[in-house]
Image (cartoon, grey):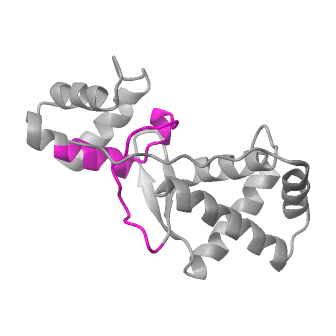
Amino acid sequence: MKLAPFTPYMSKPTNESRLAITHQIMTVSDETTDQIVQGLIQVIAMEGPVLSTRAFTLYAKKGGLAKLSGKAAKRFSAALKKGIVEGKISMELDTDAVDTQALLWLPTMERVNPRESGNRGFDDIPASELGEVMFELAAEVGDDKDTVFQAIADLYGLKQLPKNATTRLDYVFRDYLS
């Protein structure tokens, strides 16, 4: 199996982006909400399909926020809802053993796109993406769980899977291969 390349969203905070994010978070208006929607679309266009937590964090970092605050997350969630209602962003739940997150993509994108890990942590790879990788690898190496898990580690260039990955992969394995 060959994975598609992963293109990370890259941005460096500037004084202008810091002021813009602060204004968008502090000023609740249709205009600022639309600005956040457009910012999220930019992130999703580069990294989509992407988990909402990663999209929010990347957008916050563009504005120089070291950490996603509760107030920022609330504003970003409201903007996300507006983007979904307006048909600009597509969403479905992406469930794994730990939690359920929103999987975001643009209507012009495929919902699942198996890609290299890039600069994403293992937890940032959507469960649906891991499931597709797992399904395709099982067709190549068989459906023995340990063999499939090792094939996943090899495919992503890991000597071994991260400690927290096994529980998540067990859930995906049950969901896609059992």
Residue at the image point whose x is 57% and y is 77% from the top:
88
Vertical placement of residue 101 versus 66, above or below: below
Residue 39 image offset from top left, x and y in percent: 70, 63
Q: Relative to 22, does residue 10 appear above or below in the rendering?
A: above
Q: Is residue 76 above or below residue 139?
A: below
Which of the 4 image quadrants contains residue 173? top left
Left or right side of 37 for 114: left
Quarter placement of the N terminus = top left
Residue 93 belongs to magenta span = no
On the image, the x and y values in percent for residue 43 come to 61, 57
In-front residue for pair 28/14: 14
Left or right: 49, with 82 as reference point: left
Q: Image point 8% across, 35% down: which residue? A: 142
Image quarter hosting the C terminus: top left
> What span is colored magenta in the figure?
107-136
Seen at 87% across and 51% down, the residue is: 18
Q: Quadrant of residue 113?
A: bottom left
Direction from residue 149 to residue 115 in the image, left or right: right
> Residue 32 in the image: x percent, y percent?
83, 71
